[in-house]
Structures are given as structure tokens and as C-alpha cells.
Amino acid sequence: MMHVSYLLRFIEEDAPFGDVTSEAVIPEGMEARAVIIAKQDGVIAGVEEAKALFEHFGVDVGVRKRDGETVKKGDIILELEGNARAILLVERTALNVMGRMSGIATEVRRLVEKVRAVNPKVRVAGTRKTLLKPIDKRAILIGGGEPHRFSLSDAILIKDNHLALVPLEEAIRRAKAFSVYKVVEVEVESLEDAMKAARAGADVIMLDNMAPEEIEEVLEALKREGLRDKVKIEVSGGITPENIAEYAKLDIDVISLGYLTHSVKNFDVSLEMIGKV
């Protein structure tokens, strides 16, 4: 779980000068009980984050469903007891975090199961197409996917804009000389560049926006030259829940989709106040 200080910035943004409604309406020392409930079926995530936020403000939390568990509509996820103002202060932020993370985890789980049914060795990964990386990357992991790079510092990924400035083979040579510890991945869009990358010693080749037939050509060429087992093959671009199974049939290693985070559909969770203690 991420550090609570990261999560508190959302509370500070939501209540920069306090929760004026609760301060005006709710007596200062009132204690209350509440529950957080799933309003749809899916994979729950963000439970630990919500728990940390409520506990930071002195609310007692009972966990009924843990991160990664499948839930049904109406299931109680968390039981809360404590200062009523504190519960209401955290409510929307906790629900937003859980809703986003559960939405991602639910979709990741669905796609992982779809891919595994076709080819158990293929991994489903996210991308860096998000501004909420600690939340989104953890949600991908909870759903059973690969988070991909967390940041630009994690691994070397040579993309088209790098190659517009430095030739492919030189870029790989420079990358491999830079560090023996960093994985070197190269994004390519043609059979020719894929072969150049493999011959130059790339660890991972990302085949970007290629149709399944084009990817098959690359795989066959790599096998002919005895290079297939020396590289990981990632495919990305133009992949959707509708066509992902077609890509999973191929002899590839990873399918990455920015869709998992940039087009996430929020999972419906709600907080219901039970009453005063």
C-alpha cells in the first residue's frame, strides 16, 4: 500500500479549509457507525488505502472484503465507527480512490482471464498513461496484471521520438552501455526495425500498432535467425477488449494497454451512515 501522505493530499484538496457542512450541522463530539457497500459486481481494490485514510482521522475500521476479492452488489466492504465529522470528511476521497482502483482491477481481471483462456503465458500490462500512478499501478497489480514501468527511472524504453534523433542501433548501444542493471526495451513499427533491435541486443521489443499478421511475420523472422528466445515480445497499440484474444493467440510475452488506466470506468461504491453510537 502507498504511504498515507500521498493519500492525504486528496483530503487537503477536497477540504482545504475544513468540511464546512459537517462543521455547521454535526455536533463536534458525535460518534457514528457507517458501512461502505459495493453497488455492483467486480473486483474490489483500494480497501487498504481507504482503511489508512479513515484510521488516520481516528475512525475504527473493520475490513469485510480485502483487496483483490470478488464482490457482489450489496456486499459490505468496510465497517466504520468513530467521529461522525471524520467519517464524512474522508467519505468522498475514500470512495473515489476505491471506485477508481476497483474499476481498474475489475477490468484487468476480466482481460487477464480472457487472455489466459487463450494463452496462459501471456501477461497483461498497463502503461504510463496516467497521472495517478501509485493508485493505478497498484490497482493493476491487484487485478492480476503487470504495472509496466512505474516511472522514467525504472527501465529504458526507446521510443519513436528518441529514434527521430538517434539511429536505432546506436540508441541500443548507448542504452546498454549506460547500465548493466536496466532492461532495454525498444518500440518499433516494422519488421525491419524489429530485426535490427533484436540483432542489436534489445531485451524487450515492443511491436507498436501492428496487426496480428504483421506480428506473426516478425515472430517467424526472429525464429529463423535464432533470436526469438533472446528477446521478450510486447505488443501494444490498437488493442481492445474486443480483439485482445486475437493477439493472445500469438507467441508473444506481454500485451500492454493504456486503456486500462486512461479510460477506466469507475466502480460504484457508496458509504451509508447507520446512525449515532
Image (cartoon, rainbow, N blue to C red):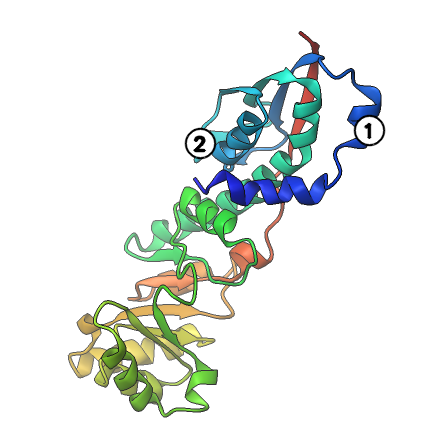
In depth, the one of 249 and 132 nearer the eye is 132
Q: In which quarter of the image is the C terminus?
A: top right
- 148 or 223, nearer to the observer: 148
Q: Which of 192 and 174 is in front in this view?
A: 174
| Residue drawn where x is 78% and y is 25% of the image | 22
Could you say where residue 207 lies in the image, as x and y percent from the top left? 39, 75
Q: Which residue is drawn at 23% across and 81% down?
A: 177
- List x then y, in percent, for residue 224: 18, 82
Q: Label 1 vs label 2: CA separation?
A: 35 Å
Asked if residue 22 shows in the view, the reply is yes
Q: Earlier in the sequence, mark 1 or mark 2?
A: 1
| Left or right: residue 236 compared with residue 37 | left
- Quarter of the rendering containing residue 146: bottom left
For mark 1, what is the residue?
21
Extreme residue in the left direction: 226
Query: In this rendering, is residue 143 above or below 133?
Result: above
Where residue 50 is drawn, which disc sits there? none
Q: What is the quadrant of the N terminus in the image?
A: top left
Q: Residue 69 carries which label?
A: 2
Position of residue 72 relative to residue 244, above or below, is above
Please rate how many residues cluster around mark 1, counting C-alpha atoms within 10 Å: few if below 14, some from 14 to 19, many from 20: few
